[in-house]
């Protein structure tokens, strides 16, 4: 990997495009390096993972509405929409499928200087592959690039510190992945990356306060926008430049300002794109920083016994966990039984209390309104608080993957003053966890979430394709979709 310094340049400096981050990203995307077998296998796993969580969300309101919008844009050849056999314009397929994938907050993650859900790259890259009739080898190359670029941007550039939503890294990564998929030249990918960044930079209010369904729509918007950016760039249209380094650009006014310095690692020419292997999926449908703590709650509950005796629960954890999903966020909605599901899955206080009581976590039952209003849950929930511990913050950012941690240390105080103390570094499903996910676990997750939604024969057909993704021909890539027997319809009309 080569580390590139990225900083603001005055217009008078006339920064050559070859030294611009967008150009260097485009060079990575246009490098025809082979995909390693273990990377291709993991891409198959993540295609299965995305389909699993999409299947479980097909009946949810935001997904129903996104699907209706997409189905209003039929196109031939087009791309598939999860749950249907329809073909629609690829940007609209990416939109509908992106919402389905993200709605339950249940797919893969990478945490570093910033947050990311790099599986969000799959819907737009897959949609374009289906539309253009490309094979599995091209699809795998495109997805590998999308993961590489988003992960590397998340390693080097912190967005949340400046209240910018993480889809600002997703727009460029999806554009780069599509560029690789299509075999586009560096110049065209460069323009698409710049346009995608410029048009997908939004604020973090989408994940603050009363969190709405836009949390699921935001990455789908980035994927749809990336496809449109590539289309314009292919037609010869350009982007603002330099998009990252300009004196009126992204870093100067939306991030650290004129004096800021960032270092972004990117593969050398000819170096394989392996970033997907540094990412991890979720066993539980909740914000990633709660994954390990759910596992810890299940482990601690038998030691605590009677939960009515609990007087205080202190979670000592990283800066990110404390300020994003903990009491450091200062969001009263995180302790409100009437809060939205999207808000509750960003409240470690709620999540830890329910996991203690149920010794389990479920993507629907754990968020049900009657569950959030249970008297015993509310009482326990409001005894949970978080504190930042510098050691956990240090481990969160540790460059050594064997030391990096996303958990915390929990101290439960009982009414007689005794305490129950335990800690966890990574989730059980993490590659270093107690039960790391491999192909078997991805398939089991898919089966569990598709049960009652997708016919068993249809599940088998899809899994056969996903498990040999790199070998698929163009026809089979077009069939890399899920059909459901019955789907709910929107309750309200829109424009389309």
Image: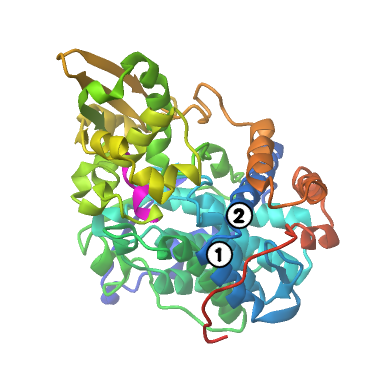
Residue 183 — which label? Answer: none
Q: Are marks 1 and 2 in contact (CB under 8 Å)?
A: yes
* Vertical comparison of 82 with 415: above or below: below
- The image quarter in which residue 101 lies: bottom right
Residue 419 position within the rendered picture, expressed as x and y whole percent measured from the top left: 22, 15
Position in image of residue 406 (x %, y %): 37, 33
The mark found on residue 54 in the picture is 2
Query: At numbered mark 2, what does the secondary structure look like: helix, strand or loop?
Result: helix
Quarter of the image for the C terminus: give it.
bottom right
Q: Which residue is mark 1?
A: 63
- Magenta stretch: includes residue 345: yes
Judge by depth and name the residue closer to the eye, 352 or 367: 367
> Does 34 sit left or right of 20 as displayed?
right
Give the colouring mode of the picture.
rainbow
Q: Is residue 14 left or right of residue 169?
A: left
Q: Is residue 97 left or right of residue 282?
A: right
Regarding residue 182, the answer to whether it shows in the image is: no
Give the magenta-colored segment's residue range. 342-348
The residue drawn where x is 66% and y is 73% is: 90
Q: Earlier in the sequence, mark 1 or mark 2?
A: 2
Mark 2 closeness class: few <14, some 14–19, many ≥20 residues within 10 Å:
many
Number of marks in the image? 2
């Amino acid at each position: 990997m080569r580390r590139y310094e990225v900083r603001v340049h005055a217009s008078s400096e006339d920064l050559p495009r070859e030294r611009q981050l967008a150009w260097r990203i485009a060079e990575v995307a246009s490098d025809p390096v082979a995909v390693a077998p273990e990377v291709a296998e993991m891409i198959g796993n993540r295609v299965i993972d995305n389909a699993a969580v999409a299947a479980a969300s097909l009946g949810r309101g935001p997904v129903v509405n996104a699907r209706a919008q997409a189905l209003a844009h039929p196109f031939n050849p087009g791309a598939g929409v999860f749950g249907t056999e329809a073909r629609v314009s690829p940007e609209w397929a990416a939109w509908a499928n992106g919402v389905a994938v993200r709605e339950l907050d249940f797919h893969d993650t990478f945490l570093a200087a910033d947050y990311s859900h790099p599986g969000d790259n799959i819907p737009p890259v897959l949609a374009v592959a289906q539309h253009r009739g490309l094979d599995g080898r091209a699809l795998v190359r495109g997805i590998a690039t999308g993961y590489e670029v988003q992960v590397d941007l998340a390693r080097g550039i912190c967005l949340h510190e400046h209240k910018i939503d993480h889809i600002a890294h997703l727009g460029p990564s999806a554009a780069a992945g599509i560029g690789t998929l299509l075999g586009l030249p560096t110049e065209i990918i460069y323009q698409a990356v710049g346009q995608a960044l410029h048009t997908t930079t939004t604020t973090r209010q989408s994940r603050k306060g009363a969190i709405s369904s836009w949390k699921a729509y935001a990455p789908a918007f980035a994927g749809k926008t990336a496809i449109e950016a590539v289309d314009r760039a292919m037609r010869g249209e350009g982007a603002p430049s330099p998009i990252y380094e300009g004196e009126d650009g992204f870093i100067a006014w939306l991030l650290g300002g004129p004096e800021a310095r960032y270092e972004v690692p990117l593969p050398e020419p000819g170096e394989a794109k392996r970033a997907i292997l540094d990412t991890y999926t979720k066993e539980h449908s909740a914000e990633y920083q709660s994954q390990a703590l759910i596992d810890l709650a299940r482990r601690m509950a038998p030691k605590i016994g009677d939960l009515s005796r609990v007087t205080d629960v202190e979670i000592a954890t990283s800066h990110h966990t404390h300020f994003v999903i903990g009491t450091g966020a200062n969001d009263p909605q995180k302790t409100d039984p009437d809060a939205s599901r999207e808000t509750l899955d960003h409240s470690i206080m709620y999540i830890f209390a329910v996991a203690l009581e149920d010794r389990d976590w479920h993507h629907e039952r754990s968020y049900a309104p009657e569950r959030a209003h249970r008297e015993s849950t509310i009482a326990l929930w409001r005894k949970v608080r978080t504190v930042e511990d510098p050691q956990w913050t240090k481990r969160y950012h540790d460059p050594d993957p064997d030391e990096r941690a996303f958990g915390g240390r929990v101290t439960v105080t009982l009414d007689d003053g005794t305490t129950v103390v335990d800690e966890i570094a990574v989730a059980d499903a993490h590659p270093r966890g107690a039960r790391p996910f491999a192909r078997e676990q991805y398939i089991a997750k898919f089966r569990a979430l598709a049960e009652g939604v997708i016919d068993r024969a249809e599940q088998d057909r899809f899994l056969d394709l996903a498990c040999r993704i790199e070998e698929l021909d163009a026809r089979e890539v077009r069939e890399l979709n899920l059909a459901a027997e019955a789907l709910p319809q929107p309750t309200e009309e829109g424009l389309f």
